[in-house]
Image (cartoon, rainbow, N blue to C red):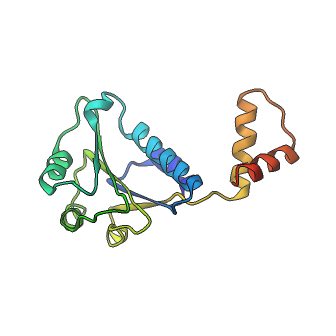
Amino acid sequence: MKFKDLKKSLTEKINSCYILSCSNDEEDLYLKASAKNNLIKAVIKEFKDLNLSVFPFENLEVNTLKKSLETLPFMSEKRLVLIIESESKKNEQVVKFLAEYLKNPSETTVLVIDESVNSSFKNLEKLESVNLVDCSRLDRDILTSFVKKTCQTKDIQIENDAVNKIIDFCDG
């Protein structure tokens, strides 16, 4: 799914696993951060500190991840486990574990993987329980709508030429 479809999807159903994918452009990284925030807000309604676990991928141990994925949420319907991958060291043991785990994921835990460009998680993207979220740049129509909507909520009038200049100046 595209980034623009994520928010609507989360109002309909929260799935067990999301992989956030994009290039290394800073604009794409902004969309990826926004996708993470949308997922956290949709999944964790209360006690964020107790229902959110964040792990760097490089030094993650399988037992630690397994315990976190199996932990029940605290006074909430679901909890979220976030794995952040960097370009450095790969962790094949965790990838193997996740390939097995995602065949029958926990109903009370949402796994979010923030993958890097040269991701170790490419094989997991094809699994049925995984939702790949493409956080690449948005097209101009969506950006135009976003700028106009933002201005409208702040009672600011904006002309189409100004919207186009903002989009061009910010490089989309």
| Observer-nearest of 37 and 74 | 37
Measuring from the top left, give residue 67's x and y in whole percent. 14, 47
Q: How many marks?
A: 0
Q: In this view of the protein, which residue sits in the foreground, 153 or 128?
A: 153
The percent position of residue 104, horizontal first and vertical second, equals 21, 60
Q: Is residue 87 left or right of residue 72?
A: right
Residue 118 lies, with reference to residue 30, above or below; the image says below
Say which residue appears at 12% left-offset and 53% top-offset: 63
Instruction: Say which residue appears at 15% left-offset and 57% top-offset.
Output: 62
Residue at 51% x, 45% y: name it. Answer: 34
Residue farthest toward the front in the current orientation of the protein: 88
Q: Is residue 47 above or below residue 61?
A: above
Q: Residue furthest left?
A: 63
Q: How far from the left and from the top, in percent, is residue 61?
A: 16, 55
Residue found at x 50% / y 61%: 22
The answer to whether 119 appears left or right of 133 in the picture is left
Residue 132 percent coordinates (x, y): 43, 62
Direction from residue 46 to residue 35 in the image, left or right:
right
Q: Quadrant of the C terminus?
A: bottom right
Would you identify the image quadrant in which residue 116 lies? bottom left
